Amino acid sequence: MPITRNQVAKLANVSSATVSRVFNNPLSVSPLLRDAVLQAATELGYTPNKAAALLRRKGTGVLAFVELEKGGRPYYWGDLASFDWFFGRSIRGVQDSLKDSSWQLRFYRIRTKQELEAIEGQCDGILGYDIDAQEEVDLFAGIGVPYVLSHHLNRGAAPSVVTTDNHYGGVLQAEYLIGQGCRRPLYITGYLKSVVPHQQRLEGFLSLFPDSLVVETEVGSPDAITPILARVLQEERLGTIDSIAAVNDLTLFELLLKSRTSLPSVGYDASPLHKLFNGSLASVDIQSGEIYRMATLELISLIGGGQPHPRVVLPRLVEL
């Protein structure tokens, strides 16, 4: 006979309702009880009856994953095919939150408020992917279902956000180079006036290296490094720089390939392409999987009547 929810509850010493909440609204249960239920479920081999849960729940049983069209920007990283892996990590995070629940996920890509309003009638809640501008936040005002926005926003930008800390990420870059014994870094960035995360990363870096050499280029373009390559090589020959940091991995990797420098280097985003390089190399991982895992749990909590709780998932340094 199949293992029942009541058997799991008995082994975990909790109520049957608590077991249900663990699998359908995890944030409504304390971590201690949640761990006890999950351990009991694993020991017994319990698998939730997703069909039955869906029948019991009022509503559609659907969560909407909404991505906004961002055409017209001079630079948007999400338009680069080389960043598809980032989207994949984010979806893995959502999947991890939903794997034992009865929730279904649908994907939408929209341009207008009207399109967003059409979606709200088809779902119980909305996950906003890569919301990074106030005009995008404003689209969600007045939406009739709970929503959670991620991942390049300040904590107070909306009632419920799960975000990264780009300033802290810049600090991590600087701390890595300090740990390598570096004192005269070069920092490569671009679009500082229009891309707030780039500003924040640079500010964090400069908080520890206020006198570092900062060079701007069209990051993300096919030849982003070409205009500054000669200068970077000259600075290295003269000994005016002893290390390199960049606002993202792709910019750093292009420089490393074209200059063949062996200076200690640190990028941003923890791209899977790092195996192309040897030497002292690190990157900052914003943990997109964890961000969207937490955003999904937060959304489920809101749908269940929970209160908004803005969250920050701190980036971490990865030595490649």
Image (spheres, helix red, strand yellow):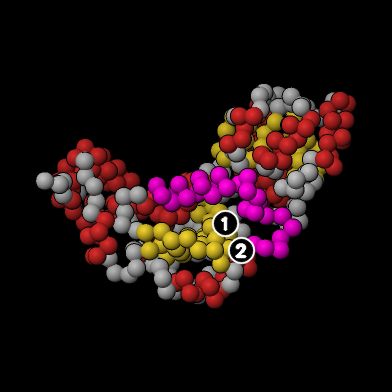
Query: Is residue 105 one of those drawn in magenta?
Result: no
**Residue 69 in which image quadrant:** bottom right
66 vs 47, left or right, is right
Q: Which of 34 and 128 is in front in this view?
A: 128
Q: In percent of the image, x 56 and y 74: which residue is there?
A: 113
Q: Which of 81 and 138 is in front in this view?
A: 81
**Badge 2 or badge 1: first in the primary sequence:** 2
Q: Nearer the viewer, residue 242 or 131?
A: 131
Q: In percent of the image, x 66 and y 27: which residue is there?
A: 277
Residue 168 place in picture, x, y as percent: 61, 43
Task: Using the image, determine if residue 190 lies above or below residue 60.
Answer: above
144 vs 260, left or right, is left
Task: Using the image, determine if residue 320 lies above or below residue 307.
Answer: above
Residue 231 place in picture, x, y as percent: 87, 35
Q: Give the range drawn in magenta.
A: 69-96
Is the residue under label 1 in contact with that under label 2 (CB below 8 Å)?
Answer: no
Q: Given the image, on which type of amino acid does mark 2 rest?
A: Glu
Q: Given the image, on which type of amino acid does mark 1 rest?
A: Asp
Task: Using the image, determine if residue 79 lies above or below residue 133.
Answer: above
In the rendered image, which residue does mark 2 sit on? 69
**How many residues crowd mark 1 within 10 Å: few (<14), some (14–19), many (20+)?**
some
Considering the whole magenta stretch, tell me its main secondary structure: helix
In the rendered image, which residue does mark 1 sit on? 130
Q: Is residue 84 visible?
A: yes
Residue 136 place in picture, x, y as percent: 60, 66
> The residue tagged with tag 1: helix, strand or loop?
strand
Query: Is residue 77 one of those drawn in magenta?
Result: yes
